[in-house]
Amino acid sequence: MNLCSHYESLTNKKRLLDSLGPLPFELISNLDAWFETELTYASNAIEGNTLTRQETALVLEKRMVVGGKRLNEHIEAVNHLQAMRWIKERITNPQRPFKIADILTIHQKIRQSIDDTNGGRLRTIAVKISGS
C-alpha cells in the first residue's frame, strides 16, 4: 500500500468514526489510561527499564511496588506519567507555543528523584546510545 492510499484509508476510517458521534466518556477514559500506560512502558523500555507492560500498569494504576525491580524503575514510570499529564494540561492553551523552557520542565519532571542535578538542564557533554 502506497502512502497516498494509506492516507486515504485512514481518512475514511476517521470520517466513519466521526459519523458515530462523540465517544462515551468511559471509553475515552479507558483509552486515555491505556495510552498513558503503553507510552510510559514503551518509552521507559527504550531506556532500559525492565518493568513489563503489566508491571508498568500496576505501578501507575495501583501504585504497587514490583518485587525484584529497582526503585528507580518505579520512579521512572511514575515520573513519565506525571510529565505526560503536565504536557496534556500545557497543550490546552494553544495560544502559547512550546519553548525550550517547557522541554526542560518535561526533562526535570522525568528525572525528578533520579538525577535532580541534571534534570531540567541541557547536557554539556556528548552522549551516545550504549550498545550502538
Image (spheres, rainbow, N blue to C red):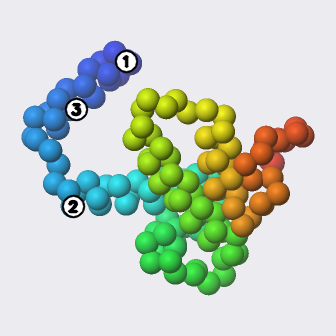
Give the residue type at disc 2: Glu
State which quadrant residue 36 falls in.
Answer: bottom left
Q: Which residue is mark 3?
A: 14
Query: Which residue is outermost to the top?
Result: 4
Residue 93 lies in what quarter of the image?
top left
Instruction: State the image coordinates of residue 29 (x, y, percent, origin top left).
Output: 29, 59
* Identity, as a three-letter code, of the amino acid under mark 1: Asn
Closer mark to the observer between disc 1 and disc 2: 2
Please name whichever residue, 129 or 30, is drawn nearer the observer in this view of the structure.
Answer: 30
| Distance CA(mark 2)–CA(mark 3) | 20 Å
The residue wearing badge 2 is 26
26 sits left or right of 122 in the view: left
Q: Is residue 41 visible?
A: no
Point out the frontmost of discs 2 and 3. 2
- Residue 63 placed where, x, y %? 50, 77
Q: Which numbered marker is on residue 2?
A: 1
Is 94 on the left or on the right of 23, as rendered? right
What is the CA distance from the residue labelled 3 to the residue labelled 1? 18 Å
- The structure residue drawn at horizontal position 55% and vertical position 33%, both measured from the top left corner, is 98
Residue plotted at (38% across, 18% down)? 3
| CA neighbours of label 1 inside 10 A, class few (<14), some (14 to 19), many (20+) | few
Q: Is residue 13 rendered to the left or right of residue 99?
A: left
Of callouts 1 and 2, the N-terminal one: 1
* Amino acid at pointer 3: Lys
For the residues bearing labels 2 and 3, Cβ distance under 8 angstroms = no
Assign a secondary structure to mark 3: helix
Q: Is residue 132 above or below residue 35?
A: above
